[in-house]
Image (spheres, grey):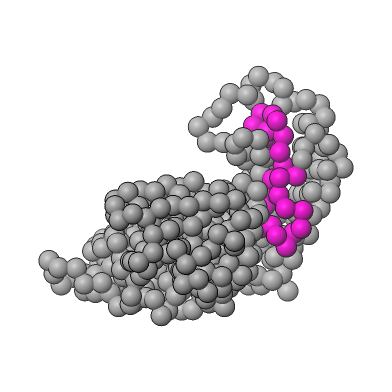
Amino acid sequence: MTDFAATRAKFHLPEGVIYLDGNSLGPLPKSARERARRAIEDEWGEMLIRAWNAAGWMDQPRRVGDRIAPLIGAQPGTVVMGDTLSIKMYQALAATLAMRPERKVVLSDTGNFPTDLYMAEGLIRSLARGHVLKTVAPEGVEAAIDESVAALMLTHVDYGSGRMHDMAKLTEKAHAAGALAIWDLAHSAGALPVDLAGCKVDFAAGCTYKYLNGGPGAPAFIYVRPDHIEKAQPALSGWLGHAAPFDFDLAYRPARSIERMRVGTPPVVQMTILEAALDIWDDVDMAALRARSIELSELFIRDVEARCPALSLASPRDPARRGSQVSFRFEHGYAAMRALIARGVIGDFRSPDRMRFGFAPLYIGEADVRRAADILAGVIEGGAWNDPVYMTREAVT
């Protein structure tokens, strides 16, 4: 059984703050400070360029990928780190379209995170081969999968509402139609059990600065199903994806391993911080984490609905259909969230009217949830959101 009191003690949590925004940016693991110091002072400072070999910098993207693999149900040697989630989704989609050249439809849904759709649109424009991006309502995805689809591209857990797709069912339907399935795990990795291998997912990508607590700018990961690795064409054929980077060939030869999905120089210091964060997961049972997440989110929903009738639940009622976040709709949601943050409860806001709250059992407990609901009720009941100081939009909401 996972000891969540012990995991909580491993994070720096500011005094007087209840942090319900780990679905946007996880808090600082205490061990990350010392780990980053060593990377900067002992490795970069003392070893200089020798650290690429002596400190294992060159192998870090593959090594860290293998540590993330068990958290997403992936086999060793199928995950590699680097770049951003947008770039990794671009790579996955480009490889998929190359593997299904006779098909022209990329199928996604209207609840997908916009950057995934932007990446798809940009790729389609640059290819200029008649591909189209088709988006349907989330509940219409299964019916829209047919023999015209090359790639099914979905975010597993919706960023706005927390609604969760049935990965196994939709991947199986895509395969039955001859399509390949790509999953964005931004709101899944570290939030709930994922079984990429069991679901026979073709490609997946995710970020590490949310539930995995790798810090702002932490690199993304990409997963490729083992039997696709040597067939996946890396559209961004960068130096470090080459079979032999230090041969300095003028012609590109992709590595025969997952390394082919590497592009440029890895962010060593940031990835070192991520390695420190991943140490916390060594003693975490994902099933226990999921059960605790549901307990906390259900408690929050009950308390908020009992106290705040002006708010309406924007997330699925059934916890089995939700990720690890809860969203409520409120006409003045932005101002209310700013008022809430001013009172020490940090969530966030997504247009047009959704107040989002993330539940990460590694550092959030029942007392936090009850207190957060109480403070939220005070903000709504007292009309604190009506203060003009909370109505001015900041750059990040």
Instruction: List the single residue furthest toward the front.
Output: 147
**Residue 56 seen from this side:** no
**Residue 86 seen from this side:** yes
Q: Residue 136, percent across and down?
A: 56, 51
Q: What is the span of residues highlighted in magenta in the rendered image?
A: 313-342
Instruction: List the single residue furthest toward the left.
Output: 250
Magenta-colored stretch includes residue 107 = no
> Is residue 321 shown left or right of residue 77?
right
Image point (70%, 60%), residue name: 321
In terms of depth relative to the viewer, which is nearer, 16 or 292?
Answer: 292
Image point (66%, 28%), residue name: 335
Q: Residue 110, percent across and down?
A: 55, 48
> Is residue 295 shown left or right of residue 108?
right
- The quarter in which the C terminus is drawn is top right
> Is residue 102 shown left or right of residue 306?
left
Q: Residue 76, percent across and down?
A: 46, 79
**Quadrant in the rendering for residue 189:** bottom right
Instruction: List the single residue furthest toward the right.
Output: 306
Instruction: List the single residue furthest toward the top.
Output: 388
